[in-house]
Amino acid sequence: MTRLARLFVLSLLLLLPTLCNAQEATAASPPENLAERTLEVANRQVFEFRATMFDASPEERAQRARDRIASLSREDLLATVYAQPVSLGNKQGVVMVLKAQPLFVVYQDDLDPVENPPLAEEAKRVQQRLTDALRARHEQLSAHRLAIGTALAAGATLGYLAMALLFARGQRRLLARVIWQLRERQRGKLSWHWLLLTVERYGVMLAHLFAQLAFAYLWLAFVLQQFPYTRLWGLKLGQSLINLLLEFTSDILDATPGLITIALILLLTRLAVHGLDFVFTAVESGRLTLPGLHPDTIGATRRLLVVVLWLFALIIAYPYLPGSHSDAFKGVSVFFGLMLTLGSAGIVNQTMSGLVLVYSRALKPGDWVHVGDAEGQVIALGALSTKLVNRLKQEITLPNSVVVGGKIVNSTRLTNDTGIPFTTKLTIGYDTPWRQVQAMLELAARRTAGVRSEPPAQVNQLSLQDFYIEYELVVRLADSMVRNEVLTELHSHILDVFNEFGVQIMSPHYMAQPQQDVVVPPAQWSPPPAKPTQDL
């Protein structure tokens, strides 16, 4: 507990006896025009005079009653108060009598005109309030009773201070442990454990504050009840706490059937999710075959069905939530509905495009694809976007709607076992035997480390141009992510092989008819490294 709080508690304890012996007029009271006609005894409201009777205003009648009660001796305060009906002229009333001495009269005109209770019943209530007020006045004048109240208040204060110190020490120990663990966790990366420790730290602080306030409330209610003048305040504090606990308990009991229903709904949904997971796991492992389920779409189908099940469970359980029919819940529902309406158009479009990609099986993580001008390996196929990594290790994020709206070229889907195909082109004149060109390109492919040996490289003659032949070398890459490195090495080997066999990589262009025919004699059709054919 802080020093300021301790000083406040000690000051309030020292002031309580003074407050108990203070005059009733110094107490908190209604507005001045009402206070003048309200009879209060020992800080207790006994009766409110409203009518002018026999030229005596309500203020004068209240003052006379105060004077008569003030003139009573301490022993008279314990006497029995009697309520005797009286009739003065045409006015009916009930006079409050103590030891044959009338104190004041309750008339029918004094009663509340709105509620208009029966005079006899109101008189009984006034009689009881007056009796209690006189007993409290007697205790207030008793030094023995004030001494007992002061002792009990002091004991309660010492107990409260001891409990506050105990809670403060416990809080310091808990916070020291949590802070030490936080410092240990901060040395590495942030994690859920670190976040939970942070929540625990503030939870300890809030719990300590709540405990201090609760004990302060109980202490104040107990101390106020030890003195007659402030007993009503203490009783009101205690009754407010009891009413709060009763209302809280009643709310819990009222909400229990709904909470049990919600628990059953969640349990059944959880069992259904486990059943779906078992079925999809069996299909994914090949132990079970279901029509319409493909290995590439099992994951998405599982997630969709799980989300649908939980949404369905939430819709069913919503009416059973405590306070679900209140205006607060309705306002929150309208707020989230408005947010969903305003922001869901783009999200729904991207999500549906993602479902089209999944169920069309156009691509999956690990595939090497061309999407528009983007080329790379698929690393994530999300609900809103598709992510690629290109040869330069750059991440490319494409909205699903863009992927669906364009052309997708999948280089992996039909070549998982043979490797991703990769091509390079060159043009050679007609005076170079095509068998030699083919053999040299195949030799260069075999010398390249990143090219798979099976299946072997393939050379295609794409077109016969006016001055040269266009060749295409098709190889299979072992790893598509090192395409640039393999391309560089392959081109290097092509240059080396062509230089090794004395063939120029050059495409001639003739401005006039050559003096000699640009042909290859049959005897030179298979120069090294080409293998001689049997036809020759």
Image (tube, grey):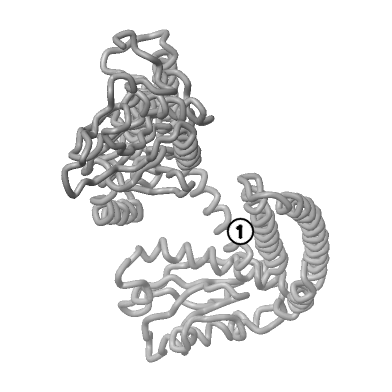
Q: Nearer the viewer, residue 274 or 201?
A: 274
Residue drawn at 65 percent across, 66 percent down: 231
Q: Nearer the viewer, residue 182 or 90?
A: 182
SS of the residue at dot 1?
helix
Dividing the image into 4 quarters, which one contains the C terminus? top left
* In the rendered image, the vertical position of residue 10 relative to residue 306, given as above or below: below
Does residue 105 show up? Answer: yes
* In the rendered image, the vertical position of residue 205 relative to residue 38, given as above or below: above
Q: Nearer the viewer, residue 316 or 418?
A: 418
Residue 131: % across, % down = 59, 66
Q: Nearer the viewer, residue 381 or 207?
A: 381
Circle 1 residue: 238
Residue 438: % across, % down = 36, 26
Residue drawn at 41 percent across, 11 percent down: 286
Would residue 176 appear left or right of 337 to someone viewing this image? Answer: right
For this orientation, the residue located farthest to the bottom is 55
Residue drawn at 66 percent across, 84 percent down: 23
* In the rendered image, the vertical position of residue 148 relative to residue 196, given as above or below: below
Residue 429: % across, % down = 28, 37
Q: Residues within 10 Å of mark 1 (few under 14, many from 20)?
A: some
Determine the image quadrant of residue 128. bottom right
Would residue 168 appear left or right of 370 to someone viewing this image? Answer: right
Does residue 481 show up? Answer: no
Residue drawn at 78 percent across, 51 percent down: 177
For this orientation, the residue located farthest to the front is 515
Residue 346: % across, % down = 26, 51
Q: Give the residue type at disc 1.
A: Gly
